[in-house]
Structures are given as structure tokens and as C-alpha cells.
Image: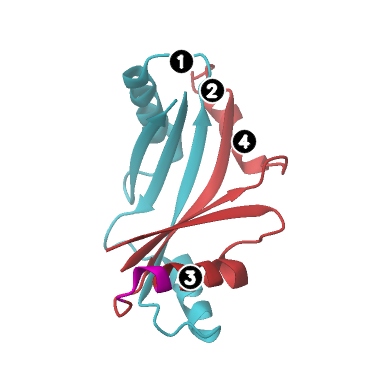
Chain colours: A cyan, B red
Amino acid sequence: MKAKVHITLKNGVLDPQGKAVEHALHGLGFPEVAGVRQGKYIEVDLPKQKDKAQAKADVEKMCKSLLANTVIENFSVEVVD
Amino acid sequence: MKAKVHITLKNGVLDPQGKAVEHALHGLGFPEVAGVRQGKYIEVDLPKQKDKAQAKADVEKMCKSLLANTVIENFSVEVVD
């Protein structure tokens, strides 16, 4: 099983990295870009885990304890075979 | 329109950040984790673009010129309304 984790900043949290990318894109000739938000994408490999629901619960626990800062970030977990 | 961009390291490219996360997860009581790869997830807001195919082409151009390092990274673009 493999888990795909998306970690994004919550709405209202400043994203200076995204702002920098947005400005750079404007400078490169993409004035139509109205906003950029940068997050993290993490793939976790769980080859021995056969239970999809259990895998999801485990990875959500990993997110809460390490991968995401839940004060300012949201996360979503998707488990695929 | 909003574009969701995933940027991941190509296979075979070392991912020290992912390795560090993997070791940390082992230490936190998740020994079943066999691998972690960390990538980037970027949301690009294009409110004036109404043409989905054109939006996708534009964002792919952005990836090639700024967002991704195509020597070591793959990217995928998904456009949603």
C-alpha cells in the first residue's frame, strides 16, 4: 500500500513561498496568475500493510505527530494499492 | 480555473528529506514505513482563464521554466474549475 499525503497551509495563513513564486511567474510573462499556494506532497510506502482503513488511520497519526503542523496546516491522506 | 501541480523527484534521485522523515517515523513508533518520498504540491490560481486545455498548457510552461527542475524532477498538472 502507498499513501499519498497532501499538506497545505490553512486559509488565512500567509504563504511567503507561494507569494515569491507568484511574483516570479509575473516576471516570467505569466501576468494571469492571481495566486499561488505552495504545499507539500509526501508518498509513504507501507508494503506490509494490507488493510486500507488501517493504513489510512496510521498515516493520519503520522501526519498529526510529525508530517503536518496542524496549527497552520491541513492534511489529506489517500491510500492506493 | 485552478491548477494543481505535483512535483516529485525522479526515480533514482536521492531524497535526503524523505529519508530523514522515514527515520523520524521509525523513531516515533512506525517501523512499518518502508519508504518516504517528499515532493511539492502547488496550487496556481488562474481566475481569468476559461479554456481548460490552454490553462494546462500555460501551467506546464510555468513548470518547465520555474516550478520544476526537469533534470531531477517530474511534474504533473491537473486543471480543475
The answer to which quarter of the image holds residue B71 is: bottom right
Label 3 lies in what chain?
B
Q: Circle 1 marks a residue in which chain?
A: A
Do the dots labelled 1 and 4 sit on one chain?
A: no
- Report the number of discs: 4
Report the residue marked by disc 3: B57
Q: Between tags 1 and 2, which lies in front?
A: 1
Q: CA distance from mark 1 to mark 4?
A: 21 Å
Structural distance between the alpha carbons of marks 1 and 2: 9 Å
The picture places residue A51, in percent across and down from the top left corner, at: 37, 15
Residue at the image position 51 percent from the left and 53 percent from the top: B40
Query: Which one is closest to the eye, mark 3 or mark 2?
Result: 3
Q: Secondary structure at mark 4?
A: helix
Q: Is residue B49 left or right of residue B21?
A: left
Q: Which mark is residue A49?
A: 1
Q: Amino acid at mark 1?
A: Gln
Residue kind at label 4, given as amino acid type: Ala
Residue B33, disc: 2
Front: mark 4 or 2 = 2
Subunit ID for the residue under disc 4: B
Does A78 sit above or below residue A38?
Answer: above
Image: magenta residue range: B50-54
Question: Circle 4 is placed at which residue position?
Answer: B20
